[in-house]
Image (cartoon, rainbow, N blue to C red):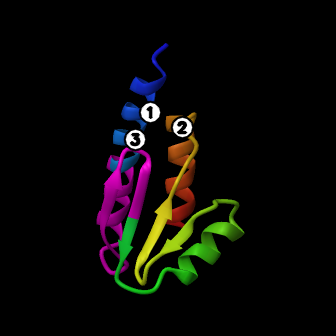
Amino acid sequence: PGFLQNVIEVGDYMRGQLTELANRHPATVEFVRGKGLMLGLKLKRAPADLVVAARSRGLLVTGAGDNTVRLLPPLIITRAHVDEAVRLLDE
């Protein structure tokens, strides 16, 4: 019970947190795109360095296309997990 509602709420929260991250790093991130929990950061450069840096901190992300970092968390993600992921990306 409440599983889908939690996915929607955490997805909205994650989008908001990633948008704030993008606003803090306008020289690197253009905007957030995607839907639900399948979100991406459209970058102003190739994603390879950010992917490597995130993975070195224990955050699994992947490059998508020429300029996007894709985040595909499990559907059981919590707001605390989102906060940790955004903190790692912010570093």
Q: Nearer the viewer, residue 16 or 61?
A: 61
Give the residue displayed 70% in from the left and 70% down from the top: 56
Tell me where residue 33 sits by quadrant: bottom left
Amino acid marked by disc 1: Val
Q: CA distance from mark 3 to mark 1?
A: 6 Å
Residue drawn where x is 57% and y is 34% of the image: 76
At label 2, the amino acid type is Leu
Q: Nearer the viewer, mark 2 or mark 3?
A: 2
Q: Secondary structure at mark 2?
A: loop
The location of residue 28, given as percent across then percent down, is 37, 79
Stretch of the chain drawn in magenta: 16-40
Please report whichever mark, 2 or 1, sits nearer to the chain's N-terminal start: 1
Disc ID at residue 63: none
Q: Is residue 85 left or right of residue 20?
A: right
Asked if disc 2 and disc 1 are in contact, CB closer than 8 Å, the reply is yes
Say which element carries label 3. Answer: helix
Residue 83 placement (x, y as % from top left) = 51, 46
Residue position for label 3: 11
Q: Which residue is mark 1?
A: 7
Which residue is disc 2 drawn over?
A: 75
Horizontal side of 73 relative to 11 (left or right) equals right
- The residue at the point 49 percent across, 23 percent down is 3
Q: CA distance from mark 2 to mark 3?
A: 9 Å
Which is nearer the N-term, disc 2 or disc 3?
3
**Residue 25 among those drawn in magenta:** yes
Coordinates of residue 78 in the picture (x, y in percent): 54, 35
